[in-house]
Amino acid sequence: MSRASRRVEVDLDSWVGDLPDRLLHCRELGHNWKPLTVSMSDGAYDRRLRCPSCRTVRIQLLTASGHVISNRYDYPDGYLAKGAGVPKANRDAFRVEAITRFLAPKADLRVAS
Ligand SMILES: [Zn+2]
């Protein structure tokens, strides 16, 4: 492992560890999209969906028959890592952090009892 890749891993762990639960859960499990707005322009639908957990907005352009032409996303501050080199499709780090947080309170209870 190169020095550069070790530095990226430390940055990734630190960034994931600082994510609020609501952002971590969407990064790990995906969003829970809810309809927000729909408008029609030039024969295509512009549909906006929003995740109530992290507040990401998904902007879909659809044909009149419902075929998806494009999707783009407007993310809240803190959702995307800036300069941490987080692999886009790799959710492993998010899963490990979520499991660690889930287990930590139980471990505290065991120690206290
Ligand atoms: Zn979300």
Image: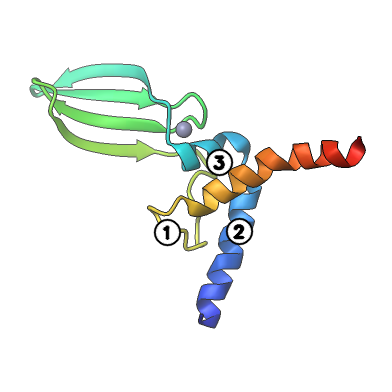
Q: Which amino acid type is shown beneath numbered disc 2?
A: Asp
* Residue with the mark numbered 2: 13
Q: Image height check: is 44 above or below 105?
A: above
As drawn, the label of residue 24 is 3
Q: Which amino acid type is shown beneath numbered disc 1?
A: Pro
Q: Image height check: is 112 above or below 10?
A: above
Q: Nearer the viewer, residue 89 or 82?
A: 89
Q: Residue at x 42, y 59 (%)?
A: 87
* Residue with the mark numbered 1: 87
Q: Position of residue 28 (x, y in %)?
A: 49, 42
| 56 sits to left or right of 20 | left
Q: Earlier in the sequence, mark 2 or mark 1?
A: 2
The residue carrying mark 3 has its beta carbon less than 8 Å from ligand 1: no
How did the renderer colour the structure? rainbow
Marks 3 & 2, CB-CB < 8 Å contact: no
Between the residue at mark 3 and the residue at mark 2, the CA separation in whole angstroms equals 12 Å
Location of residue 101 (image quadrant)? top right
| 110 sits to left or right of 57 | right
Between the residue at mark 1 and the residue at mark 3, the CA separation in whole angstroms equals 15 Å
